[in-house]
Image (cartoon, rainbow, N blue to C red):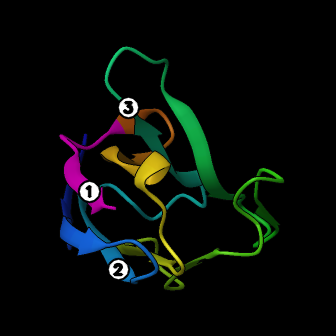
Amino acid sequence: QVQLVESGGGVVAAGGSLRLSCVATGKTFAMNDMGWYRQAPGKQRELVAGINRGGFTNYPDSMKDRVSISRNSVNTRLDLQMNNLEPADTGVYYCYLSPYWGQGTQVTVSS
């Protein structure tokens, strides 16, 4: 079993930056796929950034110039740096370590 706890969310003005962190505890030694997803009100959960077991990163076109994902070598920490935030980035951000999900952290970008 793996537990994921996110932190770093909050309220930020448009154009600002946030760094989200996810701490994983439990059986994290396997090099599973990891990522950050978000869900805006009334919308489906969507990928923000991913990193696979080989360290290859994956960003949707809408995010790739504004976010950066990183993790430590033992899969106990996953970070997401987000820059130049827009109101459309508002939502709950979830940490994912296959097949587990965190509880989410709220990000609100004010215009």
Q: For this rendering, which residue is in front, 47 or 62?
A: 62
Q: Examine the rendering and report whether any part of residue 77 can be seen.
A: yes
Location of the N terminus (image quadrant): top left
- Tag 2: amino acid: Leu
Q: Residues within 10 Å of mark 3 (few under 14, many from 20)?
A: some
Q: Position of residue 10 (x, y in %)?
A: 15, 66
The amino acid sitting under disc 3 is Ala
Q: Is residue 83 left or right of residue 103?
A: right
Q: Is residue 39 left or right of residue 58?
A: left
Query: Is 103 colored magenta in this rendering?
Result: yes
Span of residues in magenta: 101-111
For residue 40, the mark is 3
Tag 1 and tag 2, C-beta contact below 8 Å: yes
Q: Secondary structure at mark 3?
A: loop
As measured in the structure, the alpha-carbon distance from the residue carrying label 1 to the one carrying label 3 is 10 Å
| Amino acid type shown at disc 1 | Val
In the rendered image, residue 13, in percent from the top left (x then y), is placed at 29, 74
- What crowding class fits label 1: few (fewer than 14 Cα within 10 Å), some (14-19), or many (20 or more)? many
In this orientation, does residue 33 appear? no
Q: Residue at x 24, y 56 (%)?
A: 108
Relative to the observer, which residue lies in front, 67 or 85? 85
Answer with mark 1 or mark 3, whichever residue precedes in sequence: 3
Q: Tag on residue 53?
A: none
Quadrant of residue 92 within the rendered picture = top left
Query: How much space separates mark 1 and mark 2, taking CA atoms?
Result: 9 Å
Quick one: SS at disc 1? strand
Q: Which mark is residue 18?
A: 2
Specify the label residue 107 is tagged with.
1
Front-lying residue, 50 or 41? 41
